[in-house]
Amino acid sequence: MRVCDVMRKPPVYCQPDTNLAAATALMWDKDCEALPVVDENARVCGVITDRDICIALGTRNVRGSEVTVCEVTSSSTPTCRVDDDIHIALNTMREARARRLPVVNGMGGLEGMLSLDDAVMWAQHDDGARRPGVSYEDVVNTFRAICQHRSPPCRSTPIAA
């Protein structure tokens, strides 16, 4: 199974100079949690998530209309290609700890978006048969790697009564 079989298209995206209020409205209207950010040549230059917006606005004393997407997104954005095998994309998600990947063509142009949610919808029970698709185990292992804590969880010490 290839990425193009699973990805969402057409892609919904924004540009670096889009303000956070407009990006939020676009996410709301299109029911998505992340937007690829494309430059003037339609090449992917970042991704902004609803979490990025929340953290950016929660840590600044400004309105969403006063902050641009390029002020919030990171410079490194993992992507996958349209013709990649789905397992390559899942591995990229695991390594990058990303739940979503912009899908690009050979020129780096945006073609769609692949989310872990999309992979879940295509997953099948692994009954031991060799299939070209994606198994529940593939998806769960990817999700587990993404959710792995970077440091041990903080455990509170019970207070003696």
Image: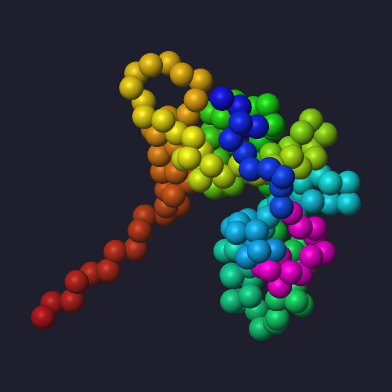
Q: Quadrant of the N terminus?
A: top right
Residue 49 visible to an observer of this rendering: no
Query: How far from the left and from the top, in percent, is residue 104?
Result: 73, 37
* Point 44% across, 37% down: residue: 139
Query: Which residue is drawn at the image coordinates 76% and 77% (left, top)?
Result: 66
- From which residue to which does the magenta span run? 13-25
Residue with the most extreme top position: 130
Quadrant in the picture for residue 111: top right
Quarter residue 61 falls in: bottom right
Taking depth in this image into account, of 30 and 140 the one nearest to the observer is: 30
User: From the viewer's perspective, is 155 left or right of 117?
Assistant: left
22 shown above or below 82: below
- Is 5 situated left or right of 135 in this image? right
Q: Spot the residue most to the bottom.
A: 61
Q: Position of residue 154 (x, y in %)?
A: 34, 63
Residue 65 lies in the magenta stretch: no
Q: Is residue 98 left or right of residue 23?
A: left
Pinpoint residue 43: horizontal percent, then vertical percent: 81, 44
Q: Residue furthest left?
A: 161
Q: Residue at x 71, y 73 (%)?
A: 21
Q: Is residue 122 above or below residue 74?
A: above
Numbered marks: total: 0
> Is 18 covered by the magenta stretch?
yes
Q: Quadrant of the C terminus?
A: bottom left
Task: Tell me which residue sits at (42%, 52%) in the image.
Answer: 149
Which residue is nearer to you in this view: 30 or 24?
Answer: 30
Residue 48 % position (x, y): 67, 58
Can residue 99 be seen? yes
